[in-house]
Amino acid sequence: MVNKLHSIVASTTAAEALERLFLVAGALGDRMAAGLAERGLTRARAAVIWLVHREGPVTQRRLAGLLDVTPRNVTGLVDALERDGFVVRNPHPTDRRATLVGLSQLGRTTATRLAAENHAGATRLFAGVDAADLHRFVSILDHVLTRLTPPSAPDEQALR
Amino acid sequence: MVNKLHSIVASTTAAEALERLFLVAGALGDRMAAGLAERGLTRARAAVIWLVHREGPVTQRRLAGLLDVTPRNVTGLVDALERDGFVVRNPHPTDRRATLVGLSQLGRTTATRLAAENHAGATRLFAGVDAADLHRFVSILDHVLTRLTPPSAPDEQALR
DNA sequence: TATTGTTATACTCTATAACTATA
DNA sequence: TATAGTTATAGAGTATAACAATA
C-alpha cells in the first residue's frame, strides 16, 4: 500500500519534470535560433560549422554520419554555407571522389563567437544556482540521457 | 581573488550544464518524434491535437496564437489533421467567418494515449531519482526558464 | 562491386502578401 | 475598417531513388 502510494506520487512528479524539461528545451531552442538568425544562420547550418570547427576539415560523408542526416542533406547545407562564405570545399588529397569541408575565416570567427556567447549565456542562465545543486542537476540530466539513449551508436550522438 | 576563482569555476560548470541540457533536449525530441511518427503524426500536428484536447473546440485564429505561428500555417496543419481523420472543422455558431476545430474520435483516443505514454515515459526516465532531488531539478529548470522567458507574453508560451 | 557526392523529386514546417467573406 | 481563413509563393530541412565519377 505504501509502495503503491509512493509510486503514484513519484510518477506524477516525473511527468511534471518532463513537462518542464520540454518547456525549457523549447524556450532554449527558440532563443538559440533567434541568435543564430542574427548571423544569417539556422540550427542545422550552425551545427555544421560547429562540427567542422571541432573536427577540422571533414568529408561530407563523415558530416552526414556525425549529423545523422543523409548525404543529400549535407550537400544542401554545405551549398548554403559555402554561398554565404562560412565554409569552403576542397578536394580530398587522396580520394578524388571525396570533398573536404573546412571553415573560412568568417566561419572560424563565427564559431569562436558562438562559443563565447554560448558560454556567457550559460553563465547568465545558471547564475545564482548553488554549485552542488548544479552538479546534481547535471547528474539527473545524465541519468535521463542514459535511459534515453540506446547503448551503442558510435557517431550518431556526437553533437546532437 | 576568491570571488574571481569562484566565478570561473561556476561559469565553466554552467556551460557544461547547458551542453548537457541541449543533449537531453535533442535526444528527447528525437524520441518523441519517433513515437509520433508511428501514429502518422509530427510534432507540429501533435501540438495541435494536444491544444484542442486541452481547450476544446477552438478557432484557427486562436490556435495560431496558442502555437505562436501564422494563421496560414494553421490552415496547413489542420488540413493535414483533417485529411488523416484526427480533427474536424465545424462552422462557428455565431461568427460565420470563423471555423471551430475539434477532435474526432480518433483524435480523442490519440490524445489520451499520447498523454498516457508521455506519463509512462516520464516515470521511466526519472526512475530512481530521489524525490527531493527531482524537486530541486525542477526548481533549477524554473530558474532557467525565468531567465529565458521575457516577462509578459500572455499566450505565446501556453504549450511550447 | 562499393563508395562519394550529386541531380531529381517530394513532404513538412514555416513565413509574407494578396484576396474573399464576413463583422 | 477590421478580422478569419484562404490562395499564391517562397525558403529551409528532411527523405528516397537514380546516376556519375572514382575506389
Image: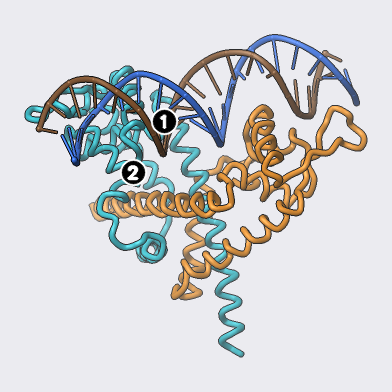
Chain colours: A orange, B cyan, C brown, D blue
Element carrying mark 1: loop
Q: Nearer the viewer, residue C10 or A16?
A: C10
Q: Quadrant of the C terminus of chain A?
A: top right
The chain under label 1 reads: B
Image-based side of A24 in relation to D12, left or right: left
Q: Nearer the viewer, residue A143 or B28?
A: B28
**What x and y, as percent, mark residue A34?**
49, 52
Disc 1 target residue:
B42
Element carrying mark 2: loop
Decide: is A58 above or below A130: above
**What x and y, as percent, mark residue A119?**
58, 65
- Identify which amino acid the numbered label 1 is placed on: Thr
**What x and y, as percent, mark residue B8?**
60, 77
Image-based side of B109 in relation to B17, left or right: left
- Which residue is painted at 58% across and 47% down in the image? A40
Q: How many marks?
A: 2
Category of crowding for the residue at label 1, using alpha-carbon neighbours closer than 10 angstroms: few (below 14), some (14–19), many (at least 20): some
- Which residue is painted at 44% across and 75% down in the image? A128
Decide: is A83 above or below B108: below
- Which residue is painted at 29% across and 53% down in the image? A3
Which label sits on residue A54?
none
- Identify which amino acid the numbered label 2 is placed on: Asp
Which label sits on residue B68?
2
